[in-house]
């Protein structure tokens, strides 16, 4: 089995995992602030880290992916960091946080995904630092009405109990659960009613992620509801089912649909690449006489297709890739017409 | 995904028969998987020289260039040989597929930051029906059915699914109707 593993990816994943373990150890002040009740979550996080870095590294080694990755950094350090940096920041807010491109794909999809994504971001922001022992809470010594938050062992904030800010902070995971549940509901409705989605959806790729997020949110809310209205009678059941669902999420992260969360920032690199392409010379199609993309992209595609074992060179010294999509379609139609003409009949 | 795909049926394309009526384009826009956007291409081949029009659907290549150049692994071929539209969660809208497909098929839908293309009406073909375009084409440029049916309709033509682009040979699931006896279409030497 070892021989089928990707060595480079294995090395990177191991290094990243060791790095995370070291950061957990140091960040939690030699595990002094680590909460032992969360140990199962911790192991799932460490596994997820290994899996995610492994898959990401394998992914980066594909010729087209590597080309974009290398180009992105090359452009970033090309002395135009301000222009590209601005493009990056703009896209980060509009498309990554605001998800405008998903809004354009459909109203329910856009709203549902935004709610779900923000719920998840909030939940990640709270859960990971808690599990790693990077933040912890404590009662301020000398009283019973002020709470303190410690980050990496340093006091960062204090707030009085029984105030709106305390409610806001203590219920952070509940708020995220509400957001996720609302989002998941919108997306489930879409999956049940949209004929196009029904035709191409799969259980593993489309339903399982939604059901898992719903289960995580409901069991998470259950812990609070049980505590508030049932005096904690069902605590064990709630805590265990919640842990199981969250651990499933983390362990599945490198393999399943949720890996797209890790892949998506690549879109920011594409924004920079596009900007650089627009500023540079354009590729003009020999058939239509119109610019259709950047010469940067055509050049890169020629290299990448060659690396992949394709040969689209033409005997006239050009390449099929010099033609725009419309030009390529015209070449085929013209060749078809010629073949029919040669056979002596236009139709047959 | 559904499994009533009819493996005895194939797509036969005869661009020479296209009369440019755009009926297929209207029908294509009915496909629910495209979000009501037509994916088929109907073009004037050379507007200034002749009124010749041509029609192009995805050829569903055996080794799809689009999928191989996709940095996001967003394009997948299924067990029936259908090369699907980009996986919406993965596509990062780089346009590699748009500019590398030797048949000029995929489209990038700008505001959605998403590639979309013909998936041979998967909502219909996976339920045993014919693709929309093939059901409305009045001239026989687009036909979906069995090889035998096609042989009866076009006794003087042969279906060909091997394309030569210089030194590159591309094999496809979709056939193009060529003069009888031909085994390949040479797009350029
Ligand atoms: S015709 Fe183009 S889009 Fe269709 S499978 Fe082949 S390479 Fe991909
Ligand atoms: S546009 Fe999308 S599907 Fe096409 S190559 Fe880029 S990432 Fe892949």
Image (spheres, grey):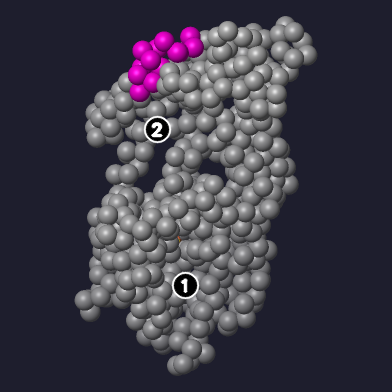
Q: Are marks 1 and 2 on the same chain?
A: no
Where residue A59 appears, as percent x and y from the top left, is: 35, 42
Q: Tell me the residue at 48%/89% (across/down).
A: B47
Q: Secondary structure at mark 1?
A: strand
Badge 2 is on which residue?
A52
Tell whether A165 sits left or right of A53. Answer: right
Is residue B111 or residue B165 the one in the foreground? B111
| Image quadrant assignment for residue A53 | top left
What whole-number distance in Å separates the C-alpha atoms at marks 1 and 2? 47 Å
Q: Is residue A132 visible?
A: no
Q: Position of residue A93 (x, y in %)?
A: 52, 51
Label 2: state its secondary structure: helix
Residue B130 lies in the magenta stretch: no
Q: In the image, residue B21 lies at what x, y percent?
A: 62, 81
Residue under the point 24% across and 35% down: A8
Name the residue rendered at 62%, 65% in the picture.
B37
Q: Tell me the residue that label 1 is attached to.
A: B177
In this orientation, which residue lies closer to the viewer: A319 or A187?
A187
A26 inside magenta stretch: yes
Range shown magenta: A23-36
Q: Quadrant of the N terminus of chain A?
A: top left
Q: Residues within 10 Å of mark 1 (few under 14, many from 20)?
A: many
Q: Is residue A138 above or below residue A164?
A: above
Task: Report whether B159 appears left or right of A320.
Answer: right
């Amino acid at each position: 089995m070892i021989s089928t593993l990707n060595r480079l990816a294995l090395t990177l994943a191991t290094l990243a995992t060791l790095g995370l373990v070291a950061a957990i150890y140091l960040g939690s002040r030699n595990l002094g602030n680590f909460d032992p009740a969360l140990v199962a979550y911790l192991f799932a996080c460490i596994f997820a880290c290994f899996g995610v870095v492994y898959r990401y590294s394998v992914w980066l080694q594909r010729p087209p992916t590597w080309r974009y990755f290398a180009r992105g950094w090359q452009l970033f350090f090309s002395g135009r960091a301000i222009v590209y940096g601005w493009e990056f920041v703009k896209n980060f807010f509009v498309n990554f946080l605001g998800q405008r491109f998903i809004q354009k794909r459909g109203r329910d999809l856009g709203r549902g995904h935004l709610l779900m994504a923000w719920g998840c971001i909030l939940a990640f922001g709270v859960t990971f630092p808690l599990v790693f022992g990077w933040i912890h809470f404590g009662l301020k010594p000398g009283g019973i009405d002020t709470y303190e938050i410690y980050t990496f062992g340093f006091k960062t904030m204090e707030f009085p109990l029984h105030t709106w800010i305390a409610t806001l902070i203590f219920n952070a995971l509940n708020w995220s659960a509400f957001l996720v549940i609302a989002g998941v509901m919108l997306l489930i409705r879409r999956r049940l009613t949209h004929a196009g989605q029904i035709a191409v959806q799969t259980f593993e790729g489309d339903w399982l992620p939604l059901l898992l997020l719903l289960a995580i949110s409901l069991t998470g809310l259950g812990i609070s509801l049980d505590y508030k209205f049932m005096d904690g009678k069902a605590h064990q059941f709630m805590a265990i089912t919640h842990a199981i669902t969250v651990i499933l999420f983390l362990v599945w992260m490198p393999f399943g649909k949720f890996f797209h969360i890790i892949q998506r920032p690549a879109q920011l690199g594409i924004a920079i690449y596009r900007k650089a392409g627009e500023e540079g010379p354009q590729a003009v199609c020999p058939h239509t006489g119109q610019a259709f993309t950047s010469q940067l992209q055509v050049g890169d595609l020629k290299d990448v297709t060659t690396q992949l074992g394709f040969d689209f060179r033409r005997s006239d010294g050009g390449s099929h890739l010099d033609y725009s999509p419309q030009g390529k379609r015209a070449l085929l139609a013209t060749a078809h017409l010629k073949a029919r003409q040669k056979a002596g009949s236009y139709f047959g | 995904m559904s499994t009533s795909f009819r493996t005895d049926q194939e797509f036969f394309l005869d661009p020479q028969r296209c009369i440019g009526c755009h009926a297929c384009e209207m029908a294509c826009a009915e496909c629910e998987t495209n979000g009501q956007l037509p994916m088929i291409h109907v073009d004037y081949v050379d507007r200034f020289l002749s009124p010749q029009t041509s029609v192009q659907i995805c050829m569903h290549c055996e080794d799809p260039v689009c999928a191989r150049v996709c940095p996001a692994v967003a394009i997948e071929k299924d067990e029936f040989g259908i090369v699907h539209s980009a996986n919406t969660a993965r596509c990062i809208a780089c346009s590699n597929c748009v500019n590398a497909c030797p048949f000029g098929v995929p489209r990038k839908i700008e505001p959605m930051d998403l590639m979309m293309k013909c998936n041979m009406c998967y909502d219909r073909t996976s339920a045993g029906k014919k693709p929309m375009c093939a059901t409305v084409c009045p001239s026989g440029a687009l036909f979906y059915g069995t090889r035998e049916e096609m042989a009866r309709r076009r006794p003087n033509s042969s279906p060909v699914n091997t394309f030569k682009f210089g030194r590159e040979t591309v094999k496809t699931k979709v056939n193009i109707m060529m003069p009888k006896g031909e085994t390949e279409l040479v797009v350029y030497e």
